[in-house]
Image (cartoon, rainbow, N blue to C red):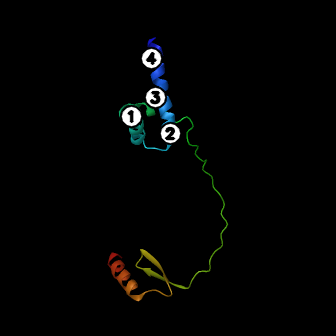
Amino acid sequence: MVSTYFERRAAFWHEHVQQWRESGLSKGRYCRVHGLSSSRFGYWTKKYPPESPVETATPAIVPLPFTLAPKAPSIGLLVGNRYALDIPADFDEATLTRLLSVLEPRC
């Protein structure tokens, strides 16, 4: 008779765990709607993990077609022996001046 009690209790919680997973409700909301103890419900959700785990895709290398875009005209600039810059032809002079003032002391 003792095992029947435990079996009924386990079946009760298992049924609720399954219904909760299908409901889309949060654990707390489901417990409030059904008058269940949230701490006990948490215990049983851990005891009965989802039956069908989410399948993970196998990593693969997939070739992607691409075309090389024509390169816009630019100016190559070497600052010291540390920094190589590729500056577009339509650069902003004020920005380049600020950048060089930061880089030059570091060379």
Which amino acid type corresponds to the residue marked 2 in the rendered image? Arg
The mark that comes first in sequence, 3 or 4, is: 4
Residue drawn at (41%, 39%), measured in percent from left and top?
33
Helix, strand, or loop for circle 1?
Answer: loop
**Residue 100 seen in the figure:** yes
Residue drawn at (48%, 38%), measured in percent from left and top?
20
Please indicate whether residue 55 sits to the left or right of residue 96 in the image: right
Q: Is residue 82 above or below residue 51?
A: below
Q: Which residue is mark 2?
A: 21
Percent position (x, y) of residue 90?
49, 88
Mark 1 touches mark 3? (CB < 8 Å): no
The mark that comes first in sequence, 2 or 3, is: 3
Question: Outermost residue, left direction?
Answer: 105
Mark 3 touches mark 4? (CB < 8 Å): no
Which amino acid type corresponds to the residue marked 1 in the rendered image? Gly
Residue drawn at (47%, 21%), measured in percent from left and top?
8
Helix, strand, or loop for circle 3?
Answer: helix
